[in-house]
Amino acid sequence: MTRRKQAAPDKITAPATAGLVKPLTARAKTPEPVDAATLREIFARLSAANPEPRSDLEYRNPYTLLVAVVLSAQATDRSVNLATAPLFAKADHPAAMLALGEETVRHHIRTIGLFNTKAKNVIALSRILIEEHGGEVPRAREHLEVLPGVGKKTASVVLNVAFGEPTIAVDTHIFRVSNRVPLAPGSTTDKVQAGLEAIVPEPYRLNAHHWLILHGRYVCKARKPECWRCPIADLCRYPDKTPGPG
């Protein structure tokens, strides 16, 4: 796969020679955030367009979801799915992953960025799950965030997708959409997450993460947003909308 320089993944320990990576930041000037009524209409439309959204990552259970999200840092979901399909066929729980060993895990994920560090983290977190959590993925954020390779964003994804908690993990796509529309503008992903979780209407909170990430990935793209086919274009306050083709 093509490797790209992106924001550092959650708590992955980079080599000592790696340079510092600047956090995601928003543009200094953004329009005023949409009001509550507009916000509700935005999510009503996203819900109508995709009533049952789901992650692009493929997984079998909370453990394989956790591993897949850890592997997805600095990698596309497609590349992760290609690597994890044969891996999860051999090991879909911590004990089986430990039995495979770090070298075999590394071989399976060698096409993914930072595969050496990620292989170490997968083995290390699997061992901790067995030793401290009875082989189960913990439902408490504080227990998730201390696992190797796991941080706030990864923990939020697992809590939302695996356990149905209304958390909104903010990646580069959600960060962009939130600042562009804008929904809950912020200079960091943590600020955007706090803002979104405070304002998204309760009926839409559980699936907000999926709707926003899919919208940012496939419609509200970074370089050329496809505004002409956007279901919320008339509600969006982004001044530089892309005209339709032709």
Image (cartoon, helix red, strand yellow):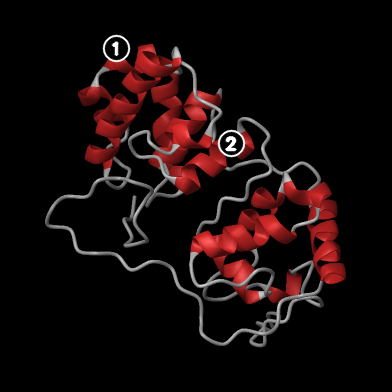
Which residue was labeled with disc 2?
A: 159
Q: Is residue 195 left or right of residue 69?
A: right
Q: Is residue 117 left or right of residue 28?
A: left
Q: Position of residue 96 (x, y in %)?
A: 37, 12
Foreground disc of the pair 2, 1: 2
- Nearest the eye: 178 or 152: 152
Q: Amino acid at mark 1?
A: Ala
Q: Amino acid at mark 2?
A: Leu
Q: Position of residue 114 (x, y in %)?
A: 27, 45
In terms of image quadrants, where is residue 131?
top left
SS at badge 2 = helix
- The residue positioned 51% from the left and 57% from the top of the image is 171
- In the image, residue 85 sits, relative to residue 111, either above or below, namely above
Which residue was labeled with disc 1?
A: 99
SS at badge 1 = helix
Give the CA distance from mark 2 to mark 1: 26 Å
N-terminal of the two: label 2 or label 1?
1
- The residue positioned 78% from the left and 69% from the top of the image is 232
Q: State whether residue 37 appears in this view.
A: yes
